Structure formats: structure tokens, C-alpha cells
Image: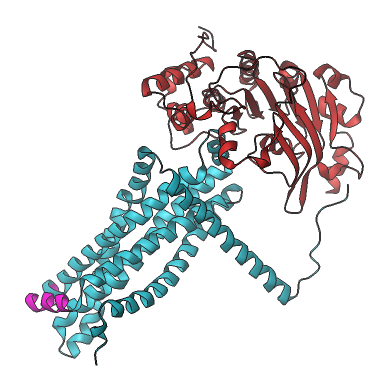
Chain colours: A cyan, B red
Amino acid sequence: MASESQAQPFDTPFHILGRWVLAFLWTVGDLSLFTARMLRWMMLRLPKRAVLLYSFYQIGVLSVPVVVVTGAFIGMVLAVQTYDQLHAMRLDTQLGAVINLSLVRELGPVLAATMLAGRVGSAMAAEIGTMRVTEQIDALRALGADPIQFLVLPRFLGCCLLIPLLSALADLTGVVSGWFISVQIFEINDFHYWLHSRMTVSAYDVYCGLLKSMFFGAAIAIVSCHRGFHCSAGAQGVGRAATQAFVLSFGVILVLDFVLDIFLNDFYYVLWPSALGG
Amino acid sequence: MGIFGSRKPNPPPRAPSSSASPMAGPHSPRPAPRASASPPVIELANIIQRFGSQLVLRDISLAVEEGETLVIIGESGCGKSVTLKLMMALLDPTEGRVLWRGRPVAAMPERQRAKDRLGYGFLFQGAALFDSMSVSENVAFGLRQNTDLSDTKIREIVRDRLREVGLREGVCDRKPADLSGGMKKRVALARALALEPEVMFYDEPTTGLDPVMSDVINELILRTKRRGRVTSIVVTHDMRTVERVADRVLMLCPAALLGPEEPQILFEGTARELMKSTNPRVEQFVNGNAGERIEELSLT
């Protein structure tokens, strides 16, 4: 038989780069189609309640301990790291403003999402990847269920709705632990700690943090499920899919954080032009 | 009661979503025996299948007639399972056409395809039971997904299907991980049969099972065929299965071993003809004799 495989004749750096770019474009295109199919199902038919509740439990309830510990340590570390600088400038009471603004606007959502990309995203990629390798995804189709509707949509909804709530929980535990270190350990005045916090942190900052977590949740669900669907055979394939899910989700979270920060900062000045000063 | 239990005629539950389909949905009445003019249940026309640069199927054409049991054999990597998945439209061919009762599958919208697919049952090689669900949830899955039957009715059907494959109610709450290989296969068969398919696909149904359990599965294939003239397509390496269940046998050769003009279908005929075949490759397979293939292996 004539062999169908062809040796790759071009292996110059230029060709390798070209192939890499093509593979990247193919992945982006496939990810877009994957997302479009999922959004189409969201309009057509939502998953059954039992399926949604299972996903929500896996994503939301089981992530609470991880998020509480993460939030608590972010708050404490921020307090310890910032105290010395502010104390040297006799601005101790500004500690609350620094901790709480950093938490609700940036560190709470980003670090909670990072932890969840590790816990939830990797688990989703591994679970779906195993289902693919063991033909369970084919079995779903054979039994009249669409794998995107049955597997991806509940996870997407779970991540979009629950990751903001988990981020809020991380914020809350961070605020409490930051307060504990600042006021109970460093003996900063309680009244002024909260006064400066209230003067600095606005509701807009809290909303921005929660909105960003919703985008982070969507990114974690889409990237992780996509990796699971493209998992190669064997234990190594499943392991690679889980790793890729975390690494890619983390990358997308950072990029989204940057883009959303620019957009939300600009949007703030659109809402309140007087804040530009002058 | 024997291992298969007593078969009670189940009143078929209605699946409104699929009843309009000419492929006849899961619970539509059995069609009358096919008139000679009606198209084959499934037809593959000039199928070529590649995965990347690897050619798996080279110009395969075959048809499966109503009520027959077609057994596809061939050595590992010859594309048997791929053929099965193409027939059920779980894979799209690189080239060529798949037809369901004369209608090209590629021209069907995905929703129609999914609806028609409910008339087909698939027993996967590794059973493919859903890990996160119990046995009863696995068997009930298709019914819950595609019908509006009450929970009581679904439980009744699940119980009956499990009894038909020789499993007692005690297994209902167990997870697939707690089952033996033979039990998994039987649960998977019960799951496929729950929607009362007209066509059953079996992907290596006896692989990994002991001889006794293999015989149980072969008997189940025969019983499934008898209930309402189910058309069956079986992919196997097991010559016992071929002898027991086949109406027609088709042997594939791995595309990589073919000469430029050689057809990939090495043999087509009855099981008796297969046993008498003088084609060396067929003989080798039937007798389990590697012959000069040992030298090929040492070359690689």
C-alpha cells in the first residue's frame, strides 16, 4: 500500500513558526465555535435541574474551603506586607484602605479564580477527558444527549454564577483576616481603620471585582471543558489536558484582568466624569 | 429463573419527540419486513476515513439489510470500530457517504440526526457507563433524556431491562466502578435496549470476558435480535461470536497492509463460507495463526 504519511520537508524556524501560528489560529477558531455552540444551547434548552445542581455542588459547595483559606491568607499577607511601609510614614490607619481596595478590586477575584482554575478547571478537564477516552461522550450522543448541552453548559453556568459568589466569600474572609491582623495584632485604631476603608473602597470597586470574577469563571469553564473535549488517549493525555486547562485558564485570567481593568477604569470616568478632577 | 430471567412483553413507552422520524424512534412500532425495493437500513458508499495522515478506511462500500446480523471481523487497527461509529454517525467520514434508509446522513441537520440516532443502540467496547451515575441511572438515562415517562414507569422499564440481561434489582444502586467486566457489559446492553432500538451495534462485545460470560453475551445478542427483528452489526475478534450470531460476515484488512489495487474488504459471506475460505489472510485470522506475519512483526 502506498503510505499516506508524508515526511515534513520544511523544518526551518520560519516554517516551524508558521505551523505554530496555524495551530494557534486553529485552536482559537475551534474554541470560538465551541463557545458559540454552548451559547446556542443556552438559548435553546437549559440542562435539567438535577444536572445543574450536581455541577453547582461540585463547583460551588466543594470549593468553599479552598476559597476561604485563600481569602484569609491574602488578607493577612497584605496586612503584614503593607504595615511596615505605612507605619514608617505614620499612615497606619490607611492600612484598611489598602488591604480592602486591593482585595475587592484585584487580589480577591484574581487569586480566588486562580485557585478555582486549579481545583475546578483541572477537575473538569480531567473528568471530561476521561469521559472522552472511555467513549462516554460517544455514549451520550448515542443516547440522544448533546455533550455540549449536557457536560459544558451546566459547568459554564456553575462557574459564571458561583465563582463571583466564591470571590465575594474570598473578599469577605480577606477583609476579616486583614482587619484581625491590623487591629488586633498591630493595634491600629479600629474606627480610623474602617473610616479610611469606607472612604476609599466604593460599591463600584466591589461590583468591578465581582464582574471580573464572572468573566474569569466563564473563561475557566470554556477553556477547561474545551481541553477535556480535545484530550488525547491514555492517562498521560488526561493528565496533560488537566495541566493545560489550569495553565491556559490562568493565562486567560491574567489577560482578561488587564483588559477588564482598562475598560472598567474608563467606564468609571464615563459614569462619573467629575472624578477626572481639574 | 435462569440467568436471563423471564421475558415479559413490555408495553413500549412512547417517545413523542422521535415518533415523527421515519427512522422510527425508540418506541415506535416495528416496521413490517422490508419489501425488496426498500433501501438498506444502513449503507456506506465509497467511504474513506483518515485521522491526520493515517488512512484507516479505503473506499469501503457496504449495506446492512433489515433484520440481518452482520459481523465485521479483522485484525486490530483495520478500522472495524471506526466503521461502526461511521454507521451511527458518531464520526463524519473524510470522504464518501453514510445513508440511513437511503437518506444521506451528511445532509441531515444535527437535531434530526440526533433524533434518528435514538432508533440505534450501541454497546461500546468498554461499556462506556457513566461513572458518576448508578446502574439504574445509567439504564434510565436515555428514557429520562428523550421521553416524558413518569419515574414509576422508568423504574419499571429499568427493572425489566436489567432482568432481561440477567441482573437483579440489587445492582441498581451500585456504581459502574463496583461491577465486574461482564456485569458492565450487561448493564450497557440494558441501557442500549431501554430505548427499544431497531438497530443494535456491538463493538467487541466479548472482549475481556471469560468464555462463559462471552457465551452469555452471545446469547443476549441472539435474544436481542429475536425481539422484534432487531438489525445487528457486531464487531468482534471472537470466532465463537461469529459462529453463533452471524448471518453475514465481512472481514477487513488494515489499510496499511494493502497493495495499491487491493480491496480492503477481504471476505464477505456466511460464517460457514468464512471457515472454508482459502484466502491465506482469512485462514490465518480464522485459525489464529500468525504465519509469515511473525516476520513482518520482527521487521517493524
Q: Residue at x 59, y 32 (%)?
A: B117
Vertical comparison of A126 with A174: above or below:
above
**Percent coordinates x, y for residue B185 in the rendering:** 57, 26
Tell me if residue A190 is in the magenta stretch.
yes
Vertical comparison of B128 with B27: above or below:
below
Q: Which residue is drawn at 78% across and 37% down?
A: B45
Q: Tell me the quarter of the picture where residue B212 sits.
A: top right
The count of marks equals 0
**Percent coordinates x, y for residue A68 in the rendering:** 26, 59
Front residue of B162 and A84: B162
Please tell me whether the stretch drawn in magenta is mainly helix, strand or loop. Answer: helix
Stretch of the chain drawn in magenta:
A185-199
Front residue of B22 and B133: B22
Q: Is residue B251 left or right of residue A129?
A: right
**Percent coordinates x, y for residue B269 in the rendering:** 83, 22
Q: In this view, does A208 lie to the left or right of B177?
A: left
Q: Is residue A41 left or right of residue B122?
A: left
Residue B275: tell me if it is visible. yes
Tell me if residue A6 is in the magenta stretch.
no
Vertical comparison of A46 with A84: above or below:
above
Vertical comparison of A225 with B133: above or below:
below
**Percent coordinates x, y for residue A202 in the rendering:** 20, 73
